[in-house]
Amino acid sequence: MRPSTTDRSPGNYLPTLDGWRSVAIALVLFAHASESLLDAIPLNFLANLGSLKMVGLIGVQLFFGLSGFLITSKLLEEEARHGRISLAAFYIRRSFRILPAALAFLSVIALLAMAGVLDISPARWFSTLFFAANYSWAEHSWYLGHFWSLAVEEHFYFLWPAAFLLLRGRGARLALVLSLALLVALWRAVDFKFQLTGSTPAVFWGRTDIQADGILWGVLIALLYADPIWKHRLRQFFVAAPSWPLLCLLLLALEGLPELNWKLSFALISMKAILMPLLILGTLVQSTRLPGRVLETSALRWVGRLSYSLYLWQQLFLVWREDRVAGLDWLQVFPLNLLAVFVCASMSLQLVETPLIAIGHRIAKRFGRLNTTRAGKRA
């Protein structure tokens, strides 16, 4: 009989996490393809387009929770192995992971804009290039709209490892992350209610200072799981057979609640953000149960590996009706749009992501060895 509880290290490669990436990107693809899907296949039970489009935000929130949890787990593992982390190695790995595919996509968008196919202002394109899209007041474009979430993640990748390195104690890290998560939640509610910054809704909901707690709760869960006492408590919680399904039902119930007063609505945002990394951790702790086994199927792992490129390229083809453009409209209808997304994403993975990631890891290893050698000399 297979044990239901496993002792996996989240810092290592885990196929379960690729499965979660596939779930997250599937929600985004479904939301953005909803109009073209209903144009091709009228389905009465999917007629509420407003609700369908919001499903994509759940996928983004899953990505946030996963990023915070996984990156922190990797930092903890590196620290446990070498005594400290190498910021240079981390930034090199992240740069070679994120930038090449993003630059390839942005180059295609720039060419389409110069050819007159897309109407994108230089200010919008350059703010996107420098991961400032979520603070830019430049004219909005659907085709670059998804970079708000990538900007949030890039800001996290830039700031958190440095804070992690400076705060060596577990207690200090936990205190900082918990305080920041609560402050972001409070600031979001206060700024929204009193319009302190005067941001438009499109800018407001994409800002890092408004969305960062979605990542910070993932960080907090990773830090807690690295603590022996909390690790035991969390594992005991997930050993209880109904615990994970109950968390799923709670998340679905919170998503399905009717509109409440603004205080409760903002409290629910934080509650849902906390649930995301807990659900992810539950499938790691109980990887041999049905949810974990499903997430580790080959099909979901494959989609998970494609998820970053899928997220980049879907914005060009999965387009709502009012944003379709002549010259691309034949590729923006179902099912050709989904086919185009997967073709472009597969090419990006094979030709851009995979070789550049390998180069980045080779360069980062050199910095990591140099960092370890220096630390040994100081010791």
Image: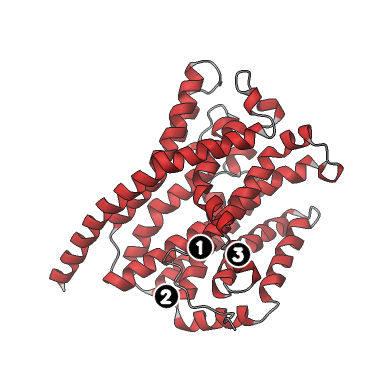
Q: Are marks 3 and 1 in contact (CB under 8 Å)?
A: no
Could you say where residue 236 lies in the image, as x and y percent from the top left? 59, 83
Identify the mark at residue 171; answer none if there is no mark: 2
Residue named by callout 1: 15
* Residue 95 appears in the picture as rendered: no
Is 123 placed above or below 94 here? above
Q: Amino acid at mark 1?
A: Pro
Residue lying at 64% horizontally and 39% vertically, measured from the top left: 201
* Sooner in the amino-acid sequence: mark 2 or mark 3: 2
Residue lying at 30% horizontally and 57% vertically, measured from the top left: 87
Residue named by callout 3: 274
Element class at badge 1: helix
Could you say where residue 49 lies in the image, as x and y percent from the top left? 77, 40
Q: Amino acid at mark 2?
A: Gly
Is 76 placed above or below 50 here? below
* Sooner in the amino-acid sequence: mark 1 or mark 2: 1
Q: Which residue is more in the foreground, 361 or 62?
A: 361
Q: CA distance from mark 2 to mark 3?
A: 19 Å
Q: Toward which corner of the image does residue 261 lie, by quadrant?
A: bottom right
* Sooner in the amino-acid sequence: mark 3 or mark 1: 1
Task: Using residue 41 as the reference point, say whether residue 84 is left or right of it.
Answer: left
Q: Amino acid at mark 3?
A: Ile
Q: Are marks 1 and 2 in contact (CB under 8 Å)?
A: no
Could you say where residue 97 lies in the image, as x and y percent from the top left? 39, 47
Q: Are marks 2 and 3 in contact (CB under 8 Å)?
A: no
